[in-house]
Image (tube, helix red, strand yellow):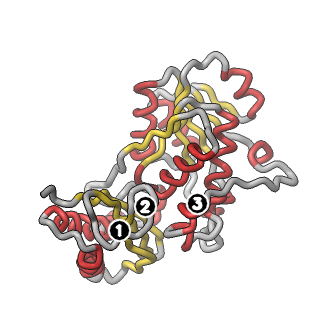
Amino acid sequence: MKLVGRVAELRAARADWGRVGRVPTMGFLHDGHLSLLRAARAVNETVVNSLCVNPTQFAPSDVFASYPRDTPRDLELAAASDVDVVFMPSEYDVYPPGFDTWVEVGALASRWEGEYRHGHFRGVTTVVMKLFQMIQPDAAYFGEKDYQQLVVVKKMVADLNLPLEIVACPTVREPSGLALSSRNAYLSVERRRAASILYRAMLRAQELASSGVSESSVLLAEMQEVLAQEFAADLDYLAIVDRESLEPLDRVVSQARMVGALRFDGVRLIDNLELTLRSA
């Protein structure tokens, strides 16, 4: 495995890599990240894992300095996953002095996470675009856990005619059902079990939809009842949306997506789940 820190070095070697699969992360790797690396390894000649804690995607309410980091462990896990190149760009390469160019996606990024984390998606799409330009992958792998991010990145790639494939990979969960996230490190093992309340609420809605309930108001009310069982869950939003536009739906016709975010013991967690109505 090769560790690369400068764009010039990366570009000098890129011509010899064949088909490149890129897995973007902010480090502090967990099994969810490793599942993306395995997916990339299966079909690409070269796998590039970018490690970049991006300061511009942190909303004012987030604390960039306290984001969990463990670079030596990340490198060990990347090597064990048969990664070919770990790219850790310098701050100068990503945001040089005087940097003032941004990539923004419109309506898709304005709702849900965009409403609660102002400026978050502008930071995400800008750094993703910059790293696409630096690495020039043939495919990039994103987890469905950050579902809105996945949809926003797909929209950016389509709108800007970028010559690469965005591959969506399933959410990986802890035994309790809690979606794997670097932020889970802020919770004890016991509290992680309790923090799976959002996932359990979504499972309840899917159970109802499987029995034929299609009204979003009924499904959302049932999810709220489940969430009320856990006093530590402070909800930001909960919605049933179209899978592509992310617009809220009054009724589920066939398939939709449940999206939600809450603060649990002060830790902000997000989740989503496909919602499928029973076939007639």
> Which residue position is annotated with label 2?
184
Q: Is residue 21 above or below residue 238?
A: above
Q: Residue furthest right?
A: 98
- Please give the name of the residue rendered at 66% of the width and 57% of the height, measured from the top-left corner: 104
In front of the other: 190 or 49:
49
Q: Mark 3 and mark 2 in contact? Answer it, CB < 8 Å.
A: no
Local secondary structure at mark 2: helix
- Please give the name of the residue rendered at 74% of the width and 33% of the height, measured from the top-left corner: 7
Q: Quadrant of residue 215?
A: bottom left
> Which residue position is annotated with label 1?
240
Residue 212: horizontal and vertical position, in percent? 14, 66
Between disc 1 and disc 3, whose residue precedes?
3
> Which residue position is annotated with label 3?
67
Q: Is residue 237 above or below residue 36?
A: below
Q: Residue furthest top?
A: 16
- Please give the name of the residue rendered at 38% of the width and 73% of the height, measured from the top-left corner: 238
